[in-house]
Image: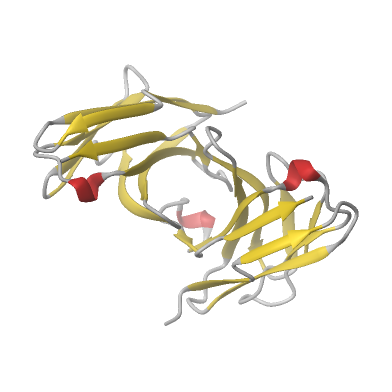
Amino acid sequence: NAGVTQTPKFQVLKTGQSMTLQCAQDMNHEYMSWYRQDPGMGLRLIHYSVGAGITDQGEVPNGYNVSRSTTEDFPLRLLSAAPSQTSVYFCASSYSPGQGLGEQYFGPGTRLTVT
Amino acid sequence: EDKVVQSPLSLVVHEGDTVTLNCSYEVTNFRSLLWYKQEKKAPTFLFMLTSSGIEKKSGRLSSILDKKELSSILNITATQTGDSAIYLCAGAGWGAQKLVFGQGTRLTINP
């Protein structure tokens, strides 16, 4: 199993550009989520999904869109990048939240810089 | 709004010392408290504590949940330089669909 994979590992964008961060998992997990991590802020939830076709907002959703057309993939779209979106982005997956959110498996992260 | 707070935010000790990291939580219909270790990249899972499992231990690491004080501690004994990392705790409520993370404690172990 590859676990949770993310691409790209690094990205530099100019203000106003758009891009998609890719996330895939091969563990047949129903639950997937996106976090951003900034110094001193821990992990903040952007969006999450409890299954294909179902997504919801987390703590900091503004400026980001998600979709979940398959169990495996959960891309994160930045619509019009802003310097405030400079951060490290982590994708995570776990078993169904109906069983109680427990161990989440994290991808390696994408370091995004917006100039 | 659910909230998780960790202390201290940063800690520097010498190899061989014992450290205690703190996590307090305000989580609606609390179900579980999780600890993660983050070295250079992705967080990795350490422990999950619930009302039915308030104490966990793995090697030199141990964690206890205090349901009365709404808090948890992570103890690391005989620290090694490889224990240097950010330690994150997170809370979840029954039926919750998201974890709430604290700010993290950056632990540095000097040789």
Q: Is residue A42 left or right of residue A63?
A: left
Q: Is residue B55 left or right of residue A1?
A: left
Q: Is residue B41 left or right of residue B54?
A: right
Q: Is residue B106 above or below residue A13?
A: above
Is residue A89 at all visible to an observer of this figure?
Answer: yes
Looking at the rendered image, the quarter that the C terminus of chain B falls into is top left
The residue lying toward the viewer, choosing from B83 and A102, is B83
Name the residue located 73 percent from the left edge and 60 percent from the top edge.
A12
Q: Residue furthest bottom?
A: A1
Q: Is residue B54 above or below residue A71?
A: above
Q: Is residue B82 left or right of residue A34?
A: left
Q: Position of residue B70 (x, y in %)?
A: 37, 22
Q: Position of residue A40 (x, y in %)?
A: 52, 32
Looking at the rendered image, the quarter that the N terminus of chain B falls into is top right
Q: Residue furthest top?
A: B69
Name the residue located 31 percent from the left edge and 41 percent from the top edge.
B49
